Amino acid sequence: MEIWKFSVLFFSAFLGGLAIFLVKNDKSQLLKLILSFSGAYLFSITVLHLIPDAYSGNDGHEIGIYILIGFLLQVFLEQFSEGVEHGHIHRHHHEHSFPYGIMISLCLHAFLEGMPLAKDHHNEFIFGIALHHIPAAFALASILLQNHLKKGPIISLLILFAVMAPLGYWVSLGLSNGSLGGIEAYFNKIMGIVIGIFLHISTTILFESSADHKINKRKMLAVLLGIGVALIGFYAGHSH
């Protein structure tokens, strides 16, 4: 178990959320570029690594069913999270009510995102997830501020969100090596669900963040860079 992976997952989300207290001017364009890069990177890693790994098991013939379940699960979660995992920041009409739906669905989403890391042998995936959580945490902190929470509770909730991906990673390690009750036989099915979630998240980031489905030059560069970095990791991993 590598502590640095837990640290990267935790601090990317936690510091991404804390940035809300430091940013004085609008950084939405920078966040969009980070989102575009991470969306392209997540999609590429899912196609290059997670899908082939999931289908290579004995239960490969039914993995597609679990991918569909994961895709639909993310559609369901977004009814409550309102797209915060994409870095969306919405103005709320009921700004004095605590956003329970957003908090719960976002934590579940982060927990599931940590699960593929048990098979992340060449460390390609961890940086995509970490990058993805920076704008998500920033959007979450912004919404908590809109709901007039004080700084202390916001920091506590950011810690809770930041812990979820490392927790998902720890649980998936236990599942994959059989130390959590010997249910490693279900690991590929769980990965199928996670793949479905990643496919939804990454394609939504890539398609919805451009007006009239036209991507400007900076965003196209970020997307190509995300795909390029994923391909470099893929070929480097297969050269050993």
Image (cartoon, rainbow, N blue to C red):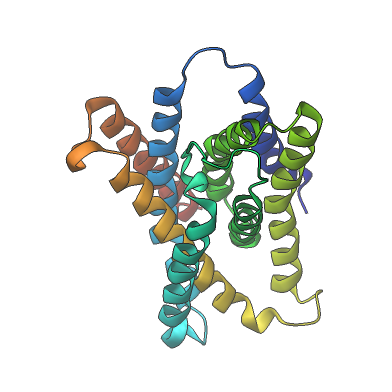
Q: Is residue 176 left or right of residue 50?
A: right
Nearer to the camera, 160 or 238? 160
Q: Position of residue 137 (x, y in %)?
A: 60, 38
Q: Is residue 50 visible?
A: no
Task: Quadrant for the N terminus, please.
Answer: bottom right
Nearer to the camera, 156 or 221? 156
Q: Position of residue 60 (x, y in %)?
A: 46, 83
Residue 128 vertical placement versus 225 (above, below):
below
Nearer to the camera, 177 or 219? 219
Q: Position of residue 143 (x, y in %)?
A: 59, 36
Q: Is residue 74 left or right of residue 100?
A: left
In which image quadrant can residue 189 be found?
bottom right
Q: Residue at x 46, y 40 (%)?
A: 88
Q: Residue furthest top?
A: 24
In which image quadrant can residue 37 be found?
top left
Question: Could you tell me how many numbered marks the image carries?
Answer: 0
Residue 185 vertical placement versus 85 (above, below):
below
Q: Residue at x 41, y 75 (%)?
A: 68
Q: Is residue 237 left or right of residue 176?
A: left
In which image quadrant can residue 168 be found?
bottom right
Q: Residue at x 50, y 69 (%)?
A: 73
Q: Is residue 153 visible?
A: yes
Q: Is residue 52 left or right of residue 132?
A: left
Q: Position of residue 138 (x, y in %)?
A: 58, 33
Nearer to the camera, 44 or 38? 38
Residue 42 vertical placement versus 146 (above, below):
below
Q: Residue at x 76, y 69 (%)?
A: 174
